[in-house]
Amino acid sequence: MPGAVLTKAQKELKRLAFLNPAHPEFGYIRTYLDWLTDMPWQTATPNDTSITKAAKILDEDHYGLKKIKERIIEYLAVMKLREKEKKNKEEEKGTTILCFIGPPGVGKTSIGKSIARSLGRKFLRVSLGGVRDEAEIRGHRRTYVGAMPGRIIQSIKNIGVNNPVFMLDEIDKLGADFRGDPSAALLEALDPEQNNEFSDHYLEVPFDLSKVMFITTGNILDTIPPALRDRMEVIQFPGYTEDEKFHIAQQFLWKKELTANGLGKKPIQVTDGALREIIQRYTREAGVRELERMLANICRKMARKIAEGKKIKKEVSKEDVAKYLGPRKYSETLAEKKDEIGISTGLAYTQAGGDILFIEVALMPGKGNLLLTGKLGKVMQESAKAAFSYVRSRWQELKLPKDFYKDLDVHIHVPEGAISKDGPSAGAAISMALISAFTQKPTRREVGMTGEITLRGRILEIGGVKEKVLAAHRAGLKTVILPKDNKKDLEEIPQNVKRDIKFYFVSQMDEVVKVALKK
């Protein structure tokens, strides 16, 4: 034990020596001393993994995720150099806390296990989803009956080393109520500057967390408090492309599901055509969980046939997919079948990845009212109002009568009314649908667009570009209009997608009209 901790332990031991075993405090002090002696103050896993071996392990376990793998190799390189320098303990600073943010099913938790394997360290995981009590993180004071340390100290004691890879899952789902704010309690543990003296309410002595590699995961950044977000290095996990899903299924998922369903020793293959059919027609997601479920479904049906003594084919072909999984769930293309008036194709970013949405505008006799439907959030409603005002202010350029809207009611609807939609990035698409409806000129169906609009018609930068472009590609769109400031985000988009889609980068709504409105 460190000196200060040893002094505290010996003091408590002296108190214990004077107490009668029947005394109520005897058990509390005994339990406290057990905790102090069981903590791995000096026990650590040796870091003997080479960078080459670590890179090989990461490639074995996960396909793609280049940026994330690079960051882990950098972490390992820094750790090795720091070990060589052997700085004084007082000077030591904890390592950067990584925060993996991305849609469900893209491998955030599983890459945590791979990191531990590549570093040769032990792995532990704590889910923070639904945690609302500060004591869950920092423990209870010893004065309470049944007091215990918090989850961080408990987990480290159970794992038995002071330098594990510690994953805090679902950090975006932390709550807060009358029992305190757990996210505020995490500030000390997740700050590399001060976590070498983490103080748990139960232990009442500092424990060094600077050797622990903390990784946090979540689906969205918005719900993580700014002070906590500031202490972490955020790494965005994008959704997978169809090609990446194909390779993941081929190299990992199919073998995994054969083994899980008792078919590991059977030489059953799945053809490339069958895999692509499942990805395109039976799943629509950012990750690969649904794809994994579909492959498991096929394996279960084959297992049943074998159990019934029937013969099965050694290969699952494209034609067999419908027999196993039933009729197709999704059509190949989501784009509209023909160019229409008063409709435009917007691009959206959701927790499950990218998607396309259609903005519909209907004009009817009335008094110039604006009606918005489709379960739109406050920001999207404001965006629609801004788009309507912009179109009204451009009546001369659009060659419309001065009071063209006074005898009309305008209804803007975004289909799939049961799904909540919010955010400012549909502004350009809403403006385009309004312009098409008022000028009675159809929009081009193969054009998708995204961008926030101002009253002056400027198109502002938006987020989730990769996911939106992949959704446009999946839906069969041939042209995508993006804000000029998002040109830098094109680097992340796969080459095969760039080849199939023509990109226009715009800064004004007039440029959008030129591309999207039919000549």
Image: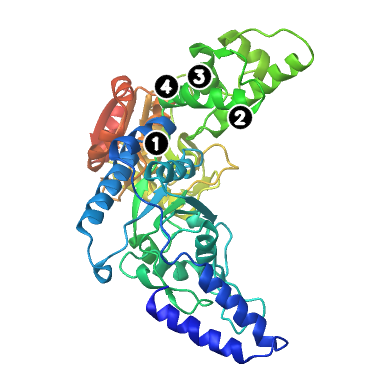
Report the quarter where the C terminus lies.
top left
Q: Residue furthest left?
A: 85
Mark toward the start of the polypeptide (2 vs 4): 2
CA–CA distance in space, label 3 to label 1: 18 Å
Label 4: which residue? 476
Mark toward the start of the polypeptide (3 vs 2): 2
Labels 4, 1: front one: 1
In this orientation, which residue lies closer to the viewer: 341 or 419? Answer: 419
- What amino acid is found at the position of numbered circle 1 in the picture? Glu
Please say if the residues under marks 4 and 1 sit with CB atoms less than 8 Å apart.
no
CA–CA distance in space, label 1 to label 2: 22 Å
Please say if the residues under marks 1 and 2 sit with CB atoms less than 8 Å apart.
no
Mark toward the start of the polypeptide (4 vs 1): 1
Give the number of the disc on residue 467.
1
CA–CA distance in space, label 2 to label 4: 25 Å
Q: Residue furthest front?
A: 17
Label 2: which residue? 293
